[in-house]
Every structure is written in structure tokens, then in C-alpha cells.
Image (tube, rainbow, N blue to C red):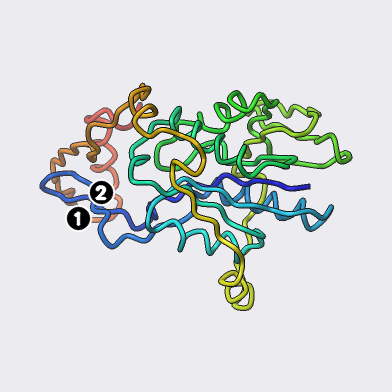
């Protein structure tokens, strides 16, 4: 079976900082990584391949940094990477991104399963997997925390619905989005990193997969006008006291007075 893992290249949120005067994010010099939940989808794909055989293909709509980011996917165990990189496709919303990915999946062809994270950790929209399934006319299983191939035509999944677990079976091919609890992604070894550089990476622009960037932007329903950190006003109160107990008592009273703690 060929499994396609949809991976989003995002800035490392642990390294992201904001300009204190403008509240704008400082992205220059911040490394790019695979969105964490997508990485868990990739890990799930690799584990299925290790157990049942087959091939794992990593697919991303990205930019100049994506080829480097996808090396990690190849080092983890993906057999090949596909990247759609076109200046005209920058700034698409979830709908446009889904159309690009669906077109790329059609071009790859001959797949049995498509895996992705339940959402990317930069936009948190949780739409792309669902939209890709709809565009391709495939069944969709969301919030999967366990996956098991029943045979070459059926997949069993345990869905995490917060207060209950739901066990479902779906005919393949299908699209599945996974939650954080599904696994802990592996850390590539030095040898696997070296081998990753020899694995194939295919680059496509918009014309290669038959999409029109201008048409996609004209259909855009969501446009991000600006990104800034919330304004936080600090009162800079200093809690003083003769003893630790007295300071704690005064701190708790101050928090109650400010409505931070209930009584």
C-alpha cells in the first residue's frame, strides 16, 4: 500500500518571538519544522509500513525552506517527498490549500491511505484533511488515536471523542486525521539522516499539477490581514511582607481582588 502523509512546514513555535513595540511576530532566522500533529501522522504511516509493507510518501505545499524540512520526514522513514512550491500559491486559505493538495495527490495516484494531523499548530483551522477528502470523493475518519489495517481494503480506527472512544471501520482508500495521543514520533538516527539525502524529492509548481493560482486566490474566502500578539497590560505590583506566609497571603488577596481567583 502507498500511504501519503500530508505535512505542513511551519515556523518552530518554541522559537517564535514578538517585537515588544509592534507586537508583530519575528520570523526572520526562526527555523522551520514539520507541524507536530502532521509529524505524528507521518509516524503512524511509517509504523503501518513497517508492519504491513508498502511505501510512505510525504507531500507538502511549501516554500523555499520546505525541502530542508522534508529531509526530516525522509530521515524518519518516508520513502519519497513531493513538494508543491510556487510563488503564486503563497497565502492560500484552507480551501485553496486543500485544492492544491488534492491536485497533487491525483498526480501521485495509486494510493491506499492519506494521513494528516487533525490541525496544523500555526492556524489551528482543522479543515484541510476534511476538505481534501471531499475534493477526492473519499471517506474521512477524524480524531484517530489508534489505527489498524484489517486487510488491504479496510482500516479500523479508534476515534478520540473526548468523553468516549468510537471504533470505526472504513473502506480504503480513505483520509484519516490523527490526534496527538496516537504516538510519539521517532528521532532519526545519524545513519537515517545520511540516507535521507539520497531519497527522491520531487518539486512541482502550480502548472505541473494543473492548478491556477489566480483562480484559487479569487476563490479565497479567508484573508489574513495581520498577525500580532495580544496587548497585555501589566500593573507591576510588588507584593511585600515580613515573612513568606505574609507575602503569600497578600498575593492571594491581590489575586482575589483582581478577580483572578474565585473565593
Mark 2 element type? helix
Depth check: 259 or 233 in front? 233
Residue depicted at x 68% and y 41%? 109
Tag of residue 242 = 1
Q: Is residue 122 above or below residue 137?
A: below
- Residue under the point 52% across and 50% down: 36
Q: Position of residue 226 (x, y in %)?
A: 22, 35
Callout 2–callout 1 Cβ contact below 8 Å: yes
Relative to residue 259, is residue 66 depicted above or below?
below
Q: Is residue 43 left or right of residue 60?
A: right
Q: How many marks?
A: 2
Residue 165 in the image: x percent, y percent? 73, 29
Left or right of residue 263: residue 232: left
Q: CA distance from mark 2 to mark 1?
A: 7 Å
* Above or below: residue 151 compared with residue 59: above
Position of residue 88 measured from the top left corner of the image (x, y, whole percent): 34, 40
* Residue 229 falls in image quadrant: top left
Residue identifier under label 2: 246
Lateral position of residue 59 relative to residue 90, left or right: right
Amino acid at each position: 500500500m502507498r500511504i501519503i502523509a500530508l505535512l505542513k512546514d511551519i515556523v518552530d513555535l518554541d522559537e517564535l518571538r514578538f517585537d515588544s513595540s509592534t507586537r508583530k511576530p519575528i520570523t526572520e532566522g526562526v527555523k522551520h519544522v514539520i507541524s507536530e500533529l502532521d509529524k505524528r501522522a507521518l509516524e503512524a504511516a511509517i509504523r503501518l509500513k513497517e508492519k504491513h509493507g508498502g511505501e510512505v510518501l510525504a507531500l507538502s505545499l511549501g516554500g523555499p525552506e520546505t525541502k530542508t524540512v522534508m529531509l526530516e520526514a525522509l530521515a524518519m522513514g518516508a520513502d519519497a517527498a513531493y513538494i508543491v512550491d510556487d510563488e503564486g500559491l503563497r497565502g492560500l486559505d484552507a480551501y485553496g490549500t486543500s485544492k492544491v493538495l488534492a491536485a497533487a495527490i491525483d498526480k501521485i495516484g495509486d494510493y491506499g491511505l492519506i494521513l494528516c494531523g487533525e490541525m496544523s499548530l500555526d492556524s489551528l483551522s482543522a479543515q484541510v484533511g476534511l476538505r481534501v477528502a471531499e475534493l477526492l470523493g473519499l471517506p474521512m475518519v477524524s480524531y484517530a488515536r489508534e489505527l489498524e489495517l484489517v486487510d488491504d481494503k479496510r482500516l479500523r480506527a479508534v476515534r478520540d471523542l473526548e468523553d468516549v472512544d468510537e471504533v470505526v471501520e472504513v473502506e480504503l482508500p480513505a483520509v484519516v486525521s490523527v490526534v496527538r495521543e496516537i504516538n510519539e514520533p521517532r528521532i532519526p538516527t545519524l545513519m537515517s539522516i545520511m540516507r535521507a539525502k539520497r531519497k527522491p524529492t520531487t518539486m512541482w509548481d502550480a502548472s505541473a499539477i494543473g492548478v491556477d493560482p489566480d483562480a484559487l486566490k479569487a476563490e479565497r474566502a479567508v484573508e489574513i490581514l495581520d498577525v500580532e500578539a495580544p496587548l497585555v497590560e501589566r500593573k507591576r505590583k510588588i507584593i511585600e511582607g515580613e515573612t513568606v506566609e505574609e507575602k503569600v497571603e497578600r498575593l492571594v488577596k491581590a489575586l482575589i481582588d483582581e478577580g483572578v481567583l474565585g473565593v
